[in-house]
Image (cartoon, rainbow, N blue to C red):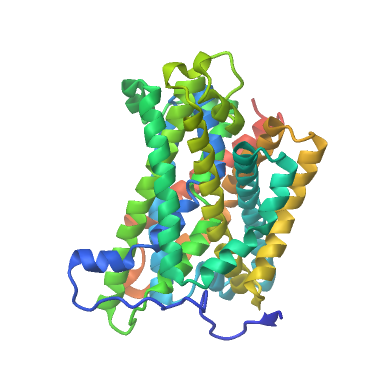
Amino acid sequence: MIQSTEGENKSLDEINGSIKVPVNAGFWKTLATYTGPGILIAVGYMDPGNWITSIAGGAQFKYVLLSVILISSLIAMLLQAMAAKLGIVTGKDLAQITRERTTKFTGWILFIITELAIMATDVAEIIGSAIAIELIFKIPLIVGIMITACDVLLLLLLMKLGFRKIEAIVATLVLVILLVFAYEVALSNPDFRQVIMGYIPHSDIITNQPMLYLSLGIVGATVMPHDLYLGSSISQTRAVNREKPENVHRAIRFSTIDSNIQLTIAFVVNSLLLILGAALFYGKNTTFGRFVDLFNSLSNPAIVGAIASPVLSMLFAIALLSSGQSSTITGTLSGQIIMEGFIRLRMPLWLQRLITRLLAVTPVLIFAFYYHGNEAKIENLLTFSQVFLSIALPFAVIPLVIFTSDEKLMGQFKNHAWVKWSAWFAAIVLIILNIYLIASTMGIVK
């Protein structure tokens, strides 16, 4: 059942190189063929973890943290382009290369950190999906949490349909999310002048500890560590003849375009979430933007005025469930990549998914029982999980920058100087902010 994967095993072997690309085709036909992996990557940037941090950011600090979403999205585009390039050029994913180029001990440490990051991502998906189930079907939250443990069956079914169909299904779910929030933001009538000003960074983000904590949660929710491993792997689903440099260059180019388009959609969704949280909650005598708060507010005329409607509330819950379930697909694939790449163990997808999911469900259930199903208390765990992702991020970014800047490994496709130093700058700033956040939380600095 479980076996070693020694040797030159391909990343996600069952789908690696499974999609043929046209030869000498035009720009749009070629782009259509390469479009798909980017949407799976983008899903990780708009999962329920993003929702709670973005909504909370708008509810507490109005539009100030829009600049954090913008900067995080630009960093994500840079890093995901590097991850895709690594996979296309080397034919290996980030986990495989990291394991090959580090000691066994270091490889295990990075594996543990990355697995914890996937668990943190799972926590967000579980809480978001469980709350959506509660809101739509009136099922108790604790029961909804246990139901989410069964979503392993969803991915197993989808994998039998083929990778292109998975991409299409996820794209449909993302479209639902985008349309729902575009509609609801339009109805909330935000101050667009203040929205635009919100994209300009403000010094308070660094000096205000609660704002910094939530900002790092947004960064952790937006720039997902496991997505870098996923991007380096699923960029190889397109068949590329690496013997010809022009083919590799074309694959990198179109994979990057696909990634940037989809991450732009994720940026828009995250911005809409924060704007909606600000428009509905900021400065009002309500608990700040939790999932249930937003659901109830959308049908409460006393809070949102004439736009209040049960239909809007239900649309929100449907979008939340779509987000949780689409994110589950990328989490499962990432778990497989990391397990096979770092510790060279292969197990059936259902078993790997079940183990990962149960590990994530357990702490959520403990919180749920301890707080008697109190959604607000449980969603605090979700925000903390996103901050942990921010802390784990450098452990994926640093190897990625090192490998993609290595001329012996990448040849003519190594990072340009501006790419390398931009990525190093982002990693160093993130590390410094995390150290400052931890020290502030512990009372070492004020």
344, above or below 356, in the image: below
Q: Is residue 382 left or right of residue 417?
A: right
| 267 or 315: nearer the viewer | 315
Residue 444 horizontal/vertical position (percent): 70, 31
Location of residue 364 by image quarter = top right
Q: Is residue 385 left or right of residue 92?
A: right
244, above or below 42, in the image: below
Q: Which residue lies furthest to the right in this view?
A: 370
| 373 or 391: nearer the viewer | 373
Residue 373 horizontal/vertical position (percent): 75, 35
Residue 19 horizontal/vertical position (percent): 37, 76
Q: In this view, does 442 lie to the left or right of 13?
A: right
Res 177 seen here: yes
Figure label count: 0
Quadrant assignment for the N terminus: bottom right
Res 430 seen here: no
| 203 or 385: nearer the viewer | 385
Residue 30 horizontal/vertical position (percent): 25, 69
Q: Which residue does the image show at 41% across and 55% down from the upper left? A: 171
Q: Which residue does the image show at 31% across and 70% down from the upper left? A: 251
Q: Which residue does the image show at 69% across and 33% down from the upper left? A: 375
Quadrant assignment for the C terminus: top right
Location of residue 71 by image quarter = top left
